Image (cartoon, rainbow, N blue to C red):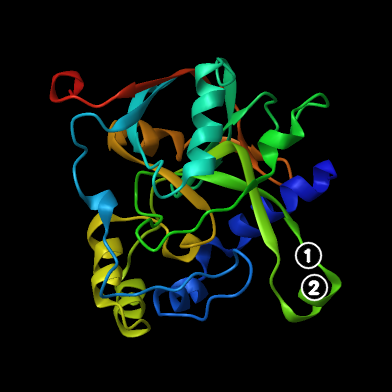
Amino acid sequence: MKKNGLLKTVLILTVVMGLLTVILLFTSVKQAENNTYITIDPDTMKLIQLEPPKDGDPIAIVDTTLGEFRFVLYPEQSPNAVKNFTELAQSGYYNNTYVFSSESGAYSAAGSKLKNGEMPQDYDKSRELVVRELNQNLWTFRGAVCSLNTTVDRSFKERVLGGGTYFNGSRFAVINSIEFDDETKQALLEDTNNERLGQAFIDNGGIPNFAQQMTVIGQTYEGFDVIEALSNLETESSGIYNIPKEDIMINSIEISEYTSENSK
């Protein structure tokens, strides 16, 4: 797996940020023999990110240069990605890593050992080859924390007809929101047969066109001012990422359990 291959998918996600074509994913689609699409059943879909955390839920406490934010983890829905993230956090891997991209108020990307967002030469490839996990109950609402895609494995047939197995890794994105102007709101409500989901994006913010494109591992419940700040940094483009001019760091990530007492 080449370094450039690791970055290409992330770049593509950034380029399509302003598009709304992924709204089609809100409707039920045929399950392929890969992790490219999932079947969405509006009757059984639960928007669990809109529910407050409960005592005993696993959480991550992220201390950054700009302050702290906390998010609940979803090991039941995204078991492999959450396990990867949790093990890395508990090992101290994320200590003094960079926020390496800040995207015009929409989202930030973090967890890189290098300021430019690339992987160091001695990185553990197994940590970057976690099969992407998509779930009809997890969406890229404001505050969602997502494992960034790294690469895709496709056969020749899949290259021609579509499909393949997508992977994610150690670096993660923290979703803030696009601007929901009247045109965007109208498109969300008119171009999907799942009005409840479209309205949830309008009410809570997020990036609809990232929906079902990345593994969602958690949902922020405290520190929205911090994720807002992380997504609005002064940057300069590397051609791949909008890298913060000032070094913005993840000081540490602590894995804990939610209790009403440790909630601010």
Q: Quadrant of residue 161?
A: bottom right
Q: Residue at x 62, y 46 (%)?
A: 168
Question: Which image quarter: residue 110?
Answer: top right
Cα distance, mark 2 to mark 1? Answer: 6 Å
Q: Is there any visible trace of residue 117 in the rendered image?
A: no
Residue plotted at (58% across, 64% down): 16
Does 108 appear above or below 96? below
Left or right relative to 68: residue 4: right
Residue at point 48% right, 38% down? 82
Q: Position of residue 253 (x, y in %)?
A: 45, 20
In terms of depth relative to the viewer, which is nearer, 102 or 167?
A: 167
Marker disc for residue 181: none
Measured along the vertical axis of the image, is residue 186 above or below residue 176? below
Residue occupying the far left of the picture: 260
Q: Split into 4 quadrants, where in the image is the N terminus?
A: top right
Mark 1 element type: loop
> Dot 1: few (<14), some (14–19), or many (≥20) neighbours within 10 Å?
some
Whether residue 120 sits left or right of residue 20 in the image: it is right
Taking 244 as reference, is 230 left or right?
Answer: left
Residue linked to disc 2: 159
Which residue matches tag 1?
A: 154
Compared with 172, 187 (above or below) is below
Q: Amino acid at mark 1?
A: Arg
Rendered-image quadrant of the C terminus: top left
Q: Name the quadrant containing residue 143.
A: top left
Among the two numbered marks 2 and 1 on one chain, the one whose residue lies closer to the N terminus: 1
Secondary element at image label 2: helix
Asked if labels 1 and 2 touch by Cβ distance under 8 angstroms, the answer is yes
Q: x and y percent of residue 35 in the render?
A: 59, 63
- Expressed as whole percent of the image width and height from the top left, the position of residue 95 reads 55, 15
Is residue 129 among what the camera can see?
yes
Tell me the residue at 23%/29% (across/down).
Answer: 56
